[in-house]
Amino acid sequence: MNTVVCAKTNQDIILLDKIANSGEGEVWTTNWSGMLAKIYHHPTPERFAKLEVMITHQPDDPNKQLNHNSFAFPQSLIKDNKGNLIGFLMPQIQGGVELIDIYNPRRRRIKKLEVDWHFLHYVALNIASIMTTIHREGYIIGDVKPQNILVNSQALPSFIDTDSFQVRHPYSSQIYPCLVGTEGYTPPELIGKDFHNIEQYIYHDNFRLAVLIYQLLFSYHPFSLGHWQGAEDKPEQNELIKRGYWIESEHNLLTHNQNTIPLNILHPALQKLFKKCFNDGYSQPHLRPSAEDWFYGLSQGVNHLKVCDQIDSHVHSSLENNCYWCDRSNKLNADIFKLPTGIKSTSKIRIKSSSSTNYNNDQTNLFPKNKNKSTQIFDAIFDANNIEEILKQNGKEITIIGQVINNITNGVLPHKQNSQYLVLQIKTIEFFDNNQEYQSYNIQEYQPLYIIVNFQKFPLFLNTINNISIDLYLKVYGKIQVNKGIRWFPRKNIPIFSIIPPFLRRSRGDRTDTIIVRNHLNTPQIFLENLNQIMVLSESEAKSLLSFSDQNNNANVNSQP
């Protein structure tokens, strides 16, 4: 038996059975309960520098209280008996099957799995919530594919192969790229690119997530089936992705046939998200829905599912009178939700249980027997204009929807004299005029929300944040800090872009170089630590998210079905 050493504790680890071997390395079971060891064939200093960042900065596992590992994150480096770094320890994921075994009808019948549309919605919902957690910590998954996601019988997924993630050092601009990708999941703008030389962003993962969710809900890839209407031969899948041709694209070159499933069987919120990702997001990748957007859309979808009156394994939208799956199976003489012999449907029990409750911002567990309160990863959504309520959230992590009023670049905060900041302000209450005569509108005893970025600490934010213009709608996530002592002093040559409330505009004048915040006003702030905390929305999206949040808050709901 081989013996290696844990670099964190200097304790011996015995390698027992080799369970996987690839060009990158070997994976072994160990004598440490619930832990696997990955040993690299060709260790490099860069690889271990990346792993050190991951070990030090772990995402919060949303399923920790359910005793489920949502991701097999590195826990410690491993040394050989000469003290050389050779690999790392990670949690062992047990009791799961690959994602393709869940969404592929033939494979789930072979494995005798009970899977219906309700179960598939839940798997997609939980993948979205886990990816939100990962993105919030600043990681990009990169190699998103079905083989890297295992799912258990509770519809709880686990991400493996996490050492391939793209990692950004949280205190510098150092990027450790994701070097691998999978055909069919690479967004069009990255096809043919050398992953060794590019930095990936959250919107690249957003494309991959949309493909996975489509496969879960429809059982096939969105850029595959369909009747080709073009003059030339039907392009390969990668070429279809590169051109933006899918079955619901505006080009109408790929159309439905008897084997394809129409998008309109989904809840309208999900239809919109798919179109936004694959149509709008084709030329403007930053418009692709985030993992959190998918969570909210899938929550609405799950809340509008019902069991078919004829076949228990058929679950369809409650917005439709007829069961689509019955109509399809009668037409094609093939039922993709036919259960394996000996397997009985539990859909009525599950959907009855989930219909008695609703969804809040907790990670979602499919079955009612696990009633443990899980870690909150989706926090309450607040309207940026509701400053009084935001102030009450001091110290809490929340999501805020608002419209940009000011973009104050290169400002210097008095308590951080050497730090370059940008401030996005939601609403202006006080300002100076050109003669620096103080104009005070003491409307309330608090200031509007400030979103603050330290460009010395995070220099790569500069270009992105500077492009955020006045009147854009933003979704911002972070911890609220209420500051009672920030003062902005008059300063020349600081570009300040202001739009003040309509009832003050007639007396606005031209004010371009100075702004002040009085000491006694309470100022709610969010300090950005990664770009995944901020997202540009359309007006309709902003209103939709706020409306969804209001409905959930009014229902006083919880996420356990």
Image: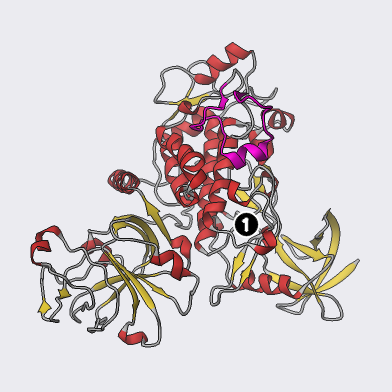
Q: Quadrant of residue 297?
A: top left
The span picked out in magenta is 227-256
Q: Residue furthest front?
A: 231
Look at the magenta stretch and give its main secondary structure.
loop
Q: Mark 1: which secondary structure?
A: loop
Q: Quadrant of the C terminus?
A: top left
Residue 254: in magenta span: yes
- Identify the coloring: secondary structure
Left or right? Give the position of 318 relative to 6. Answer: left
Residue at horizontal 42 percent and vertical 69 percent from the top: 528
Left or right? Give the position of 462 relative to 174. Answer: left
Residue 331 seen anywhere in this rendered image of the structure: yes
Residue type beneath disc 1: Phe
Q: Quadrant of residue 120?
A: top right
Kindly identify which residue carries mark 1.
71
Residue 354 at x, y = what percent? Answer: 44, 37
Q: Nearer the viewer, residue 156 or 490?
A: 490
**Location of residue 432 with respect to 306 vertically, above or below:** below
Residue 367 seen anywhere in this rendered image of the structure: no
Residue 290 at x, y = what percent? Answer: 47, 50
Q: Quadrant of the N terminus?
A: bottom right
Residue 478 at x, y = what percent? Answer: 40, 65
